[in-house]
Image (cartoon, rainbow, N blue to C red):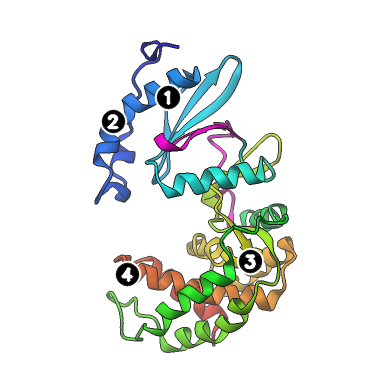
């Protein structure tokens, strides 16, 4: 197909305004319409609708012959390589199917899901158990070379030990009791994972869409090995604005039940990962998420 057979894609202004591009990526954005045209030519694609986007990727509905796909474009780099590896590993089990990939150009051809059906649209009480089921659905034997959840704990502990309680942005400082709680659970999480199962290290409702082969499918998995409850904290903090303080543990337990997790170990992962993310927020100047972390920690640390 000649690139001229497709109209030039107009990149939405909302994508251009994403914080992701404040410090880098301007050259990639400038070349994006041409890159889409070239990729459509290489893969014999016909554009079939308006693009949609997240914070880091533009997704264009396309057709190849009678098959419906989406063309996902994102800046090339290690993240793209990791996503391609994860999708090839799970091969459609609980994840979107990867039809083709051009890692050097940051391009992926994916099965088309319901672009109006993200899991974020469901009430939190319905959405979080679905995440739990997906955690268990993805929990097959992991490749030995996948990053280990226990190893990442060891790497994080050194940063936490250097953190002082008065480090803050506005009122975002981490209370010493929360730091102590995270460091207290770290040894059991870092000695060894309780399993060597495949783990999605980036699981939240914004990364799940309604499918047809399976009711819900993960779109941007990150393949890890170890405890599948590693990222349970993210599932909670990304939806915590919809929870009353008294409901946080209730929603936690709903995920634990759906994923068939050990409650105590899952609680330890929530504590450790929340403080880890809280530190990242402070390092990167975030002001709202530290307050979400504070609420989440207060539900589990008295």
Q: Position of residue 42 (x, y in %)?
A: 45, 20
Q: Residues within 10 Å of mark 3 (few under 14, many from 20)?
A: many
**In the image, which is nearer the foreground, mark 4 or mark 1?**
1
**In the image, which is nearer the foreground, mark 2 or mark 4?**
2
Residue under pointer 1: 39
Q: Secondary structure at mark 1?
A: helix
Front one among 226 and 256: 226
Q: In terms of sequence position, does the residue under pointer 2 or pointer 3 come before the other?
A: 2
Q: CA distance from mark 2 to mark 3?
A: 39 Å
Range of residues picked out in magenta:
98-125
**In the image, which is nearer the foreground, mark 1 or mark 3?**
1
Q: Secondary structure at mark 3?
A: helix
Rendered view: 66 above or below 152: above
| Displayed quadrant of residue 267 | bottom right
Residue under pointer 2: 31
Residue under pointer 3: 229
Q: Residue at x 25, y 33 (%)?
A: 30
Q: Position of residue 181 (x, y in %)?
A: 52, 85
| Displayed quadrant of residue 74 | top left
Rendered view: 273 above or below 68: below
Q: CA distance from mark 4 to mark 1?
A: 37 Å
Q: Residue 283's mark?
A: 4
Pointers 3 and 4 in contact (CB under 8 A)?
A: no
């Amino acid at each position: 197909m000649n690139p001229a057979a497709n109209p030039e894609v107009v990149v939405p202004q909302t994508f251009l305004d994403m914080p992701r591009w404040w410090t880098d990526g301007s050259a990639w954005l400038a070349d994006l319409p041409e890159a889409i045209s070239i990729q459509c030519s290489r893969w014999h694609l016909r554009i079939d609708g308006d693009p949609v986007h997240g914070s880091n990727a533009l997704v264009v509905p396309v057709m190849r012959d009678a098959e419906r796909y989406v063309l996902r474009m994102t800046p090339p780099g290690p993240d793209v390589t990791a996503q391609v590896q994860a999708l090839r590993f799970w091969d459609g089990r609980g994840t979107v199917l990867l039809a083709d990939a051009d890692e050097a150009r940051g391009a992926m051809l994916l099965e088309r899901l319901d672009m109006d059906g993200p899991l974020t649209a469901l009430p939190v009480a319905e959405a979080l158990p679905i995440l739990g089921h997906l955690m268990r659905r993805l929990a097959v034997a992991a490749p030995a070379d996948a990053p280990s959840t226990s190893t990442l704990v060891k790497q994080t502990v050194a940063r936490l030990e250097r953190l002082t309680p008065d480090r803050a942005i506005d009122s975002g400082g981490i209370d010493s009791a929360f730091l102590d709680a995270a460091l207290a659970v770290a040894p059991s999480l870092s000695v060894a994972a309780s399993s060597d199962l495949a783990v999605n290290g980036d699981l939240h409702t914004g990364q799940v869409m309604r499918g047809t082969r399976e009711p819900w499918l993960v779109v941007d998995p990150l393949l890890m090995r170890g405890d599948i409850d590693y990222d349970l904290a993210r599932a909670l903090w990304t939806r915590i604005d919809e929870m009353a303080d008294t409901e946080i543990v209730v929603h936690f337990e709903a995920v634990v039940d759906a994923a068939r997790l050990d409650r105590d170990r899952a609680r330890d992962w929530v504590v450790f990962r929340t403080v880890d993310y809280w530190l990242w927020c402070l390092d990167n100047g975030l002001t709202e998420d530290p307050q979400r972390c504070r609420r989440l920690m207060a539900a589990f640390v008295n």
